[in-house]
Image (cartoon, coloured by chain):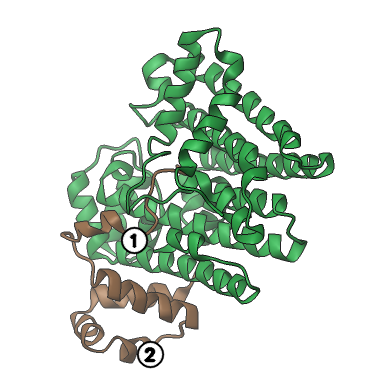
Amino acid sequence: MLPDGLGGILQDEVEILLAPLSDNTSFCDLVKETLNKTNPTLIKDTAQYRPWPLLPLLVCDAICGNWEQVLPATAGLELLKAAANVFDDIEDADNTDSVSAKYGISLATNTASVLVVLAEKGFTRLKDSGVNSDTVVTLVDKVNSYYAKACVGQHLDLSLVPEKITQEDAYLKLIGMKSAFAAECACYAGALLAGAHEDLINLFTTFGYNLGMAAQIANDIRGITGLKDINNRKITLPVIFALGQAGQVHELLNSAFLKKDSKLVSSPGQIKDLLVNTGAIKYATIKMEIYKQQAMGVLNELERTGINIEQLRQFLD
Amino acid sequence: MESQALQELVGKIFSDEETKSQFAANPEGVLSKFALTECERRAVLSAETKFGLINSDSLHLSVAGPLDDYWF
């Protein structure tokens, strides 16, 4: 049974992992600031809030009615994700509010490094929750595999020429590797530590993958409506759809997104309008709905096996 | 997975006023002319119900779906 204030309980677990830093207040504060940037809403309880950090706990509770055994791993995953975000900000250099932009690359790299190391402590703490060593090793191995795959995706994203990712299939594969993996990994951890059998674990990871894909496409939509991805000339799903259109639209978008050395001939607002009017945003919302429906289909399948899916359904509302 | 039929459907709705009107009046009728999978068909109808035909003023898209920044 999930208690109220679960976000606060997770926060306390994160504090335990940060204990080795307590001798140096400035470093500890920087690490906490980094974690707050990643998830400032960890303990917010609003109607709109979707408790992403709690996903492993919710999955575990849905399967076995307990969540305590997955708490240290959930904190570890939270730290790993924060580290990945810092590295991503360093590599992309497109976030003026990032730790690297504010404090420099050296301090940011060191902060991300300690988050990775402390995340490992979260996984070893699982033994204190009664999880057997074999399961801990299995989890660490799988988490490392997910993050290795994310690094491959990031490498492709950083190194491929833009023309290579203007095919929808290639783009969807890329975001599956570097974005959707996190929700997939969170679901895997929750299911494994609940003692689920392989088929059930696979169902939960499929749910996590589809949830993660829907979330990334939603992020793509917001990147266009909020202009951020237009200003950064970032190729995302709506842009790929519109680039597939013939005529003047193609030429304008080709110039805006594929010839990054050239000056924008249209304002970001005009490019947004162009993307909206070609149906690019509509297309992305439909693709997002497809992934959400696939995630819902998995939840329905899980419900038929007797699993209580109510807490997980809220991610798709 | 990339879907040619879905791309064609959306492209047609946004490039042809007659198709756009037909889709607004009878979405199912327009969908039947395209070789969509059942999942795509349901997604088109669901997106239409939630967001309608999106235009530049559709700022409500900022709350579309699981939009939290958490994973990004």
- Tag in front: 1 or 2: 2
Question: Is residue A2 shown to the viewer in this render?
Answer: yes
Q: Quadrant of the C terminus of chain A?
A: bottom left
Quarter of image, res A199: bottom right
Label 2: which secondary element: loop
Depth check: give the residue in front, B57 or A10: A10
Question: Is residue A152 shown to the viewer in this render?
Answer: no
Above or below: residue A235 compared with residue B64? above
Residue kind at label 1, given as amino acid type:
Ala
Q: Residue at x 61, y 34 (%)?
A: A76
Q: Quadrant of the N terminus of chain A?
A: bottom right
Which residue sits furthest left? Answer: B57
Q: Residues within 10 Å of mark 1 (few under 14, many from 20)?
A: many
Q: Residue beneath label 1, please?
A: A242
Determine the colour of chain A: green
Q: Give the letter of the chain under mark 1.
A: A
Quote the CA–CA distance across marks 1 and 2.
22 Å
Above or below: residue A203 compared with residue A155? below
- Circle 1/circle 2 CB separation < 8 Å: no
Q: Determine which of the numbered discs, if any, sits on residue B33 in the image.
A: 2
Label 1: which secondary element: helix
Please provide percent x and percent y for residue A85: 49, 33
Depth check: give the residue in front, A37 or A271: A37
Determine the colour of chain B: brown
- Please indicate whether residue A303 sits to the left or right of residue A262 in the image: right
Please provide percent x and percent y for residue B7: 40, 72
Q: Residues within 10 Å of mark 2 (few under 14, many from 20)?
A: few
Quarter of image, res A233: top left
Residue kind at label 2, given as amino acid type:
Lys
Q: Residue at x 36, y 59 (%)?
A: B65
